[in-house]
Amino acid sequence: MNKKKILQLCTFLVLTNTFLTTFSNSATAREKAPTQTTLIQKTIEQAYTKFKPVQDGQNASYIPYLAKADSALYGIAIVTVDGQVFKVGNADHNFPVESVSKIFTLADVLQKKGADTILRKVGVNATGLPFNSVLAIELNNDKLGGSPPAGNPLVNAGAIATASLVEGKTVEAKWKSVLDTASAFAGHPLHLNEDVYQSEMASNQHNQAIAILLHSYDALYADPMETVDLYTRECSYDVNALDLATMGATLANGGTNPRTHLPVVNATTSAHVLAVMATAGLYNTTGEWLFKVGLPGKSGVGGGIVAVVPGKLAIGVYSSRLDTAGNSVRGQLAVQFIAEALGANIFSSKAQ
Ligand code: GLN
C-alpha cells in the first residue's frame, strides 16, 4: 500500500467510527429517555402504594393548625434538572412549609451576605439535639461545639438568627425578600397561610424565648420580636409536594429553576445550602437519614420533605404524620425507597 492509500483508509475508518458512535449515541439517547421517564414514574407509584397503608407517627400537636391536618393525604413529586415533572397521589395539596423554608431563607441570606456571615454569625455544625433546643444554644455558647450559639441555620435558633440577617429596612421588606426568593425557587408566587400564621403566633412562646436568649449572647442581628414574627411568617407559607420538588430541583440545578429557566441563586450558594441540609436537614436524626438515604434532605413539621440528588433531580413528599424528631414518617420511607430504586445515594460508587 502506498502512503496515499493508507491515508484514504485511515480517513474512511475515522469517518465510519464517528458515524457509528454518533448513531449509536443518539439511539441510546432515544432509548434512554423514555426508559428513564418510565422508571421514575413507576418508582414513585410503587413508593406511593407501598407506604400508603403506613399509619405510624402523629401530626405535630404543638401547633393547633397542624394537629388537625388530614393525615390520609399523601403525595410524591419528582422534578428533574431538565424540567420533567412526575407526580402521584396528593402532590398538589397545599400544606404549611414550616422548617423546609429554612433552606430558602438561608439561600437568600447566603446569596446576599456571603458564606462568611453564616459561618461566623450562625454556624453550620450539627447540634445533635432537637430542632427547638435551648440547651444547644447554651452548649454552643460555651464553645463546646466550636460553633456560634445559634448552631446552624436549620434548627430553630439558627433559622431565627438567619432570619435576623435578611436584608430590608422594615419587617415587611424582609418578608418580601424571603417570600420572593422562595417563590422564585417554586417558580410561581407562594402565599402566606393566614390561619397557620395566627395559630403559630398565638403559640410560639418557645421561639420567642430562643430569640431573646440569642439576643442576650449578641447572636441575634435584629429586633428579637420582629425577627420571631418574620421567622413565623416564613414557616407559614403554603407549598405542595410538587413545589418542594421544583424548589429542590433548583438547588440540584446549581440555583437555576429548571422549569422557569430563571436563575434564583448561584451555584456556590446552592452547594452551601445542600451541605447544611446534609448536616442538619432532619435535625437530630440527620445522621440516620444520611446513612440510609445518602441524600441531602430537609423536613418540616407540616409533613413536607425535600431530598436533592445534585445535578439530577429532587423529590418532594407530603404526609403529615411525624416521628418523634419531627420528620414525616411516610416521607422518609418514600424517599429512601425512591433513592434506592434510582441508585441515587451520593455516597454509593454505584450511583447512576
Ligand atoms: N414553625 C415551627 C417551629 O418553629 C417549625 C418547626 C419545624 O418544622 N421543625 O417550631
Image (tube, rainbow, N blue to C red):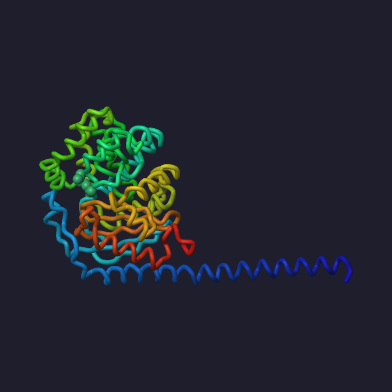
Give the answer, above or below, for where 224 lies relative to 52.
Answer: above
- The picture quadrant where one finds residue 49 is bottom left
Residue 143 in sight from this viewpoint: yes
**Where does the image place residue 257, in percent across and percent down from the top left?**
39, 50
| Left or right side of 227 for 348 | right
97, 205: nearer the viewer: 205
**Where does the image place residue 163, in percent across and percent down from the top left?**
27, 36
Quadrant in the picture for the N terminus: bottom right
Name which residue lies at 28% across and 39% down.
158
108, 294: nearer the viewer: 294
Give the answer, above or below, for where 140 lies relative to 130.
Answer: above
| Left or right side of 294 for 282 | left
Name which residue lies at 36% across and 56% down.
290
Q: How many marks?
A: 0
Residue 166 in sight from this viewpoint: no
**Where does the image place residue 256, in percent across and percent down from the top left?**
41, 48
| Left or right side of 323 for 339 | right
**Where does the image place residue 308, in percent across and percent down from the top left?**
38, 55
Name the residue at the right extreme: 2
Give the answer, above or below, for where 54 lies relative to 125.
Answer: below
Give the answer, above or below, for where 2 lies relative to 152.
Answer: below
| Left or right side of 273 for 322 | left
